[in-house]
Image: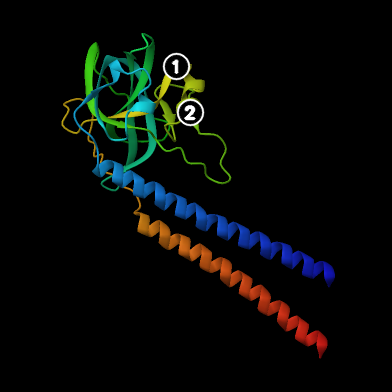
Amino acid sequence: MRKGKLLATLLTVLAIAILVKLGFWQLDRANEKEQLFADYANRSTPTLSLNTHRAPATAIPRFAEVSVQGELLENYLLLDNQIMDGQPGYHVIGLLEANLADARQHIIMINMGWVPWGETRQQRPELQLPAGKVTINGYFYEPNISKIWGMGDTLVESDQWPVRVQQLDADAIRAATQLPIQPYVVLLSESAELGWPRQWQPQVMKPTKHRAYAFQWFSLAIACLLVFWFASRSKKIKTEE
């Protein structure tokens, strides 16, 4: 009986810890989404030139209007699991070779818009990117890299080009491709003639919904604790009788 009670206690504590952790994770996601919407609403002008910055990631706010000159590589990335009008597809991530103020060449990821999946998952879209020197106008963006329980490192399918990725994790992509990928993205302006259909206003779960999920997880944790308490109390009363 003692072993059974100890096991039940450990399982209950574990379940409550997991539920509480999920609740706080949802609250963190709500705060991230609030900041995302605020950054988009307060995006800055005038246009800033990335070519004149040494370290744009530390100097330019998210969604600021930027421009950058360089040449797009023939190869590109496909950001997986992107939805448009209810249809699954990819975001095409061009790789722009550009010189910044430090006089070194960098590869800047350019989100050029959405394309649908191929007929099969094995068939990756073959696209033609502009050749020669181009000027990219758009919005500065630093991707949030989420870590999901039970998942390993960011998945980068670099067995062939175009490379398919699950997140725009610059470190993982740099390691897989051996290219000097920078830790930020330029979202190609919706008015640019280049690229494919795109809409950059955040299309993500609202903070209120994340908080509602957090409330559910915390409620389940409390319910789990109450069930264990009542069950233990009931056994104690029976033992005394």
Kind of element beneath mark 2: strand
Observer able to see residue 124: no
Residue 154 percent location from the top left of the image: 51, 34
Tell me if residue 104 comes above or below residue 211 in the rendering. above
> Which residue lies at the image location 38% right of the left edge and 15% below the top edge?
106
Q: Is residue 239 left or right of residue 197?
A: right
Residue plotted at (27% across, 42% down)? 40
The image shows residue 209 at horizontal and vertical percentages of: 38, 59
Q: Position of residue 46 (x, y in %)?
A: 18, 29
Numbered mark located on residue 157 in the image: 2
User: How packed is label 2: few (under 14 Cα within 10 Å), some, or many (20 or more)?
Assistant: some
Quarter of the figure that contains the N terminus:
bottom right
Residue drawn at x 35%, y 50% is: 34
Residue 69 lies in quadrant:
top left
Q: Type of residue at label 1?
A: Leu
Would residue 216 be visible to someone looking at this image? yes
- Residue at mark 1: 179
Q: CA distance from mark 2 to mark 1?
A: 15 Å
